[in-house]
Each structure stands twice: as C-alpha cells, then as structure tokens.
Image (cartoon, rainbow, N blue to C red):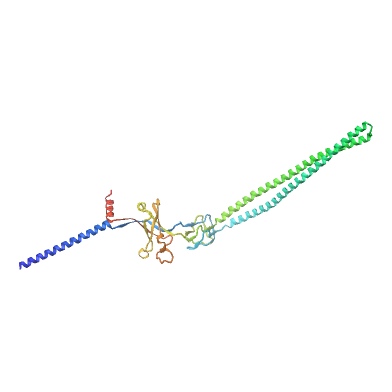
Amino acid sequence: MPIAFSRSLRALAAESARGTVLGVALAVGFLAAWAAWLVLARVSLIATSEEARLEVARAAVPLAPVVDGRVLSVSLALGRRVDAGELLLELDSRGLQLARAEVDAERQGLLTELGALAGEHAALAAAIEAFEAGGRTRQSEASASAQEARVAAAFARTMAERSESLRGLGVESSEAAELLQARERGSAAVATIRRLQVARTRAELGERLATMRIDLARTSRAEAELQRELAAKIAAIATLDHQIDQHSLRAPIAGRLGGVVPLQPGAVLARGAVVAVVIPDDPLRIVGRFTPAGVGRIRPGQPARMRLDGFPWAEFGSLHGRVAAVASEAEDGLVRVECDMSEQADQMSPGTGSKIPVEHGLTGVLEIEVEAVSPAALLLRTIGQALAP
C-alpha cells in the first residue's frame, strides 16, 4: 500500500512539471511574437482635418449685378448648364435706352450736317481752284494787253519824234506833226491805263481769292467743331451702352448653376447681391483645413481619404486621393490642404455604378496618412511625450 501511494506522488509530480514547461514555452512564444510585432509591424499615423469639402479645380464664380435695379427677365435654374456669355438675368434699363436713343438722334443730325458741310467745303475748294486758274488767264490777258499798249505807245512816240524832225526840215506840215504828237500822247495814256488795269486785276483777284479762302477756312473750322461734337456723342453712346450692358448679367464661364436665389420679374436687386454661382466643368478635388500643429507632417504625395457627411463610409465607402499642395500660411487659424482625386476619376464618372454621389460642395472629414511607424517606435514616442516637461 505505501509503495502504490509513492508511485502516485511521482506521477503527479511528473505531470505538474510537464504543464509548467508547456506554460513557460507558450509564454515565451507569445512574448517573442509580441516583440516581433512591436519591431516589425507598421502602424499608420493619421492627421484628421477640422473641415473638408469637395471643390472643382477652378473656383466657382459668383453671379451678382454691379448696379441696383428691377428685374426685367430671369432665366436662373438650379443645375442648369450655361455657356460662357449666356444672358441669365436682365435688369430694367429703359431710361438709359431712351437716353441712348436721344443721343443717337443727335449723332445722326450731326452726320447730316457734316455731310452738307463737306459738300460745301468741296464746292469751295473746287471754286477756288477754278478761280485761280481763271485768274491766271485774266492776268495773262491783262499783261498782254498792257504789253500791246506799251508797244503802240513806243511806236507812236517814234513816229511823233520823226514827224517833229521832218517838220523842222520843212518837209512835213505842222498839222501832221501835231496829229502824230496827239496820237503819241493818247497811246501813252492807253499804256498807262493798261498797266493800271494789270495791277487792279491782280489786286481784285487776290482780294476775291482771300475771301474764298476765308470761307473755306470757316467751313473747315465748322467741320472740325461738328467732328468734335460727333466724337462727344459717340463717346456718350459708348458710355450709355456700357451702362446698359451692366444691367445684363451673363455667365462668365461655362458650367452648371448652383446656389440659385429664387427671383421673379419685378423684384428689386441691390448691387453686389449674389443670385447664383457658376460651377465650372472641372475635375473635383478634396480641400481640407487642418490646424497648424496637425499640418506640420503633411507633404505632397501622401495618401488621403475623405469620408462624406451623411453617407456612412461602411455603406458608401470613402473617396481616395493624394496630397497635391499644402498652403504655407494659415487662414482663420487653419491651413488649407488640397488633394488630387485623379486616381479615382474612373470610379466617379457617370455609368460606373459608384455609390458615392460626388459633386461640388459636399462636406466631410479628410484623413491623411502622414507616417507609418512600428508600434515600438510609437510606444517610445508616446512615453517621451508623456515624460517631456
């Protein structure tokens, strides 16, 4: 009986030793696996934004009138596609249009006056040219007549002198000599008259030509004055056209209308009141805003993920992209970070069956993987931060 009990004790001792060895082995294995995980595994560090939204690559352009006015016509509809330059809203500008019509009528009157004055100017110029040509002919005629009179007077003088010589010799009678002397005096008088006629003709032609040139200069001055008034009217019309155009609100770019304010003809709009925005047809991007402390380790190229508000990520999934740009200055205490979504463009295109309703203006939370470290390094970093003063 004592021998059997001793054997039972030894069996129990052997079985206990085997359990202890197995427990120690399991513990050592677990510690080894944990140590390997601490050293070899990688844990992603995520920077989370304070706010994030989807935006088109180019900023949406707000539509706002630049003048006060009453709505005359409106064609704003949420989501409607518009082309650049398309008329979307028109304010009442009838007063300006009436003023423009009045100025345009004055411009037409000035054009008519200018046409008549131009005809008068051309007629005067032609008359001066013809008068100058005729004056040269009259001067030539008067000069030729004066030359003829001088020749006749010289011949009469010669004949009178010859007759006087012959009378002295007793060859010719006194009556004949006196007759020739009288003819000589008459020829001299005619030559003097013809010479004075040349001077008078030249003076009359010069006076008449000066008068005609004064009239021509007067028409030129009047034409210049009308041209100045016409230029002022044209400038006034251009100013009124610009003011009238300011009463028309057109799409600055092609895209879709968003943020449309309900308007009806007759409504009064104040200058600068935004009535809609035009969202361009550009690729979407994620724009997040981070605190300066959280943005310190964000760099271009890091992977990013956005979870949309109102769309559970477990059902709809997330939007993925990469950091494209990080702002260097904070705005309102937050730093802007832009992420490119070109890698997910195919999933967001129509007809792919994507559950994510991506469009401009959706909000959510942006998460950026800033670093992948081992758990051991993360543990040591946490301990260091806790012990730091």
Observer-nearest of 324 and 316 = 324
Observer-nearest of 338 and 139 = 139
- Residue 220: horizontal and vertical position, in percent? 68, 47
Observer-nearest of 173 and 212 = 173
Residue 342 visible in image: yes
Residue 87 visible in image: no
Outermost residue, top direction?
A: 168
- Residue 140: horizontal and vertical position, in percent? 79, 43
Q: Quadrant of the N terminus?
A: bottom left
- Residue 230: horizontal and vertical position, in percent? 64, 51
> Which residue corresponds to the image point at 76% horizontal and 46% vertical from the top-left?
133
- Residue 287: horizontal and vertical position, in percent? 40, 56
Q: Is residue 211 above or below residue 16?
A: above
Q: Is residue 150 above or below residue 321?
A: above
Using residue 48 as the reference point, say whether residue 247 is left or right of it. right
Using residue 136 as the reference point, say whether residue 165 is left or right of it. right
Q: Residue 369 falls in which quadrant of the image?
A: bottom left
Give the tally of numbered discs.
0
Using residue 241 as the reference point, say whether residue 134 is left or right of it. right
> Which residue corresponds to the image point at 82% horizontal and 41% vertical from the top-left?
145
